[in-house]
Image (cartoon, rainbow, N blue to C red):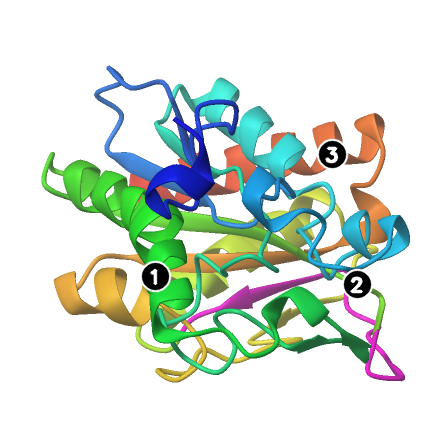
Amino acid sequence: MEAAADHALLCDTDPVPVEILNRESEVPVLLLCEHAGRKIPRSLGDLQVNEDVLISHRAWDIGAEDVALGVSERLNAPLILQRYSRLVIDANRPPGGTDSMPEISDGVVVPGNQGLTSADKQRRIDEIFAPMNGAIEQYLELGVKACFSIHSFTPRMNGIDRPWHAGFLTRQAQDTAQTLMRSISRQQPSLELAINEPYQIEDETDWFIPHYAEARGLPHCLIEIRNDQIDHVSGAQLWAGCLAKAISEFMETLS
């Protein structure tokens, strides 16, 4: 099936949008990595941006997948990964919102996102966003007691330096975020950590926490790690170990 034949976005040679690890795990923790991949559907070419953009933070969360995989392996917890670039559709933004399919990303114009029709946008929602949404809904119905989303951020954005090594984002689960941050601080005292930096959770710009975690009253946190610490194997593994320990300590408080 070719994309052009039936106006679908994805064709048979495109990867599936969502990968799920530890599907059969009974560990009551759900891990997410919404910006793990940087794939682009064949039908969209390269969105008319160059390779430097496609390997940068604009296209994906550098190092986040490696950290998420490491945490999942250590905890034997289910992990949902999104394989397509956030430039195609951002899996952690309200679908159809202004940041969902960005026309400009950190000062770079994305020509392939200019002038999208309603049908263009709906195909991206239906074929990429919806499968991840469905996987999240499925796992949240299985008795999950806490959920954690793993992201990374660039050290400099829109001309502004970001000094934090990691941020722990939440609105209604401050105790969860504080517990994780204290654990990481004990393990790595030299790190500069913060609550709700370099971003804050907002209904207009975030999806998983407002739409799922808060709506269900689940303990949660969106964990942002500065990507220069995890763009290499040893750094990603160090952070995976620290986060796995922090999450385990937090889960013990729920027992």
Mark nearer the N terminus (2 vs 3)? 2
Mark 3: secondary structure? helix
Which class describes the residues within 10 Å of circle 3: few (<14), some (14-19), or many (20+)? many
Instruction: Please name which of the two marks, 2 or 3, marks the residue nearer to the observer.
Output: 2
Instruction: Please name which of the two marks, 1 or 3, marks the residue nearer to the observer.
Output: 1
Q: Nearer the viewer, residue 255 or 52?
A: 52
Q: Quadrant of the N terminus?
A: top left
On the image, numbered disc 3 is attached to which residue? 236
Q: Where is residue 103 in the image (x, y as percent from the top left)?
A: 63, 77
On the image, numbered disc 2 is attached to which residue? 154
Q: Where is residue 124 in the image (x, y as percent from the top left)?
A: 40, 56
Residue plotted at (69% across, 38% down): 239
Amino acid type at mark 1? Phe
Which class describes the residues within 10 Å of circle 1: few (<14), some (14-19), or many (20+)? many
The residues colored magenta run 157-170
Residue plotted at (60% across, 50% down): 44
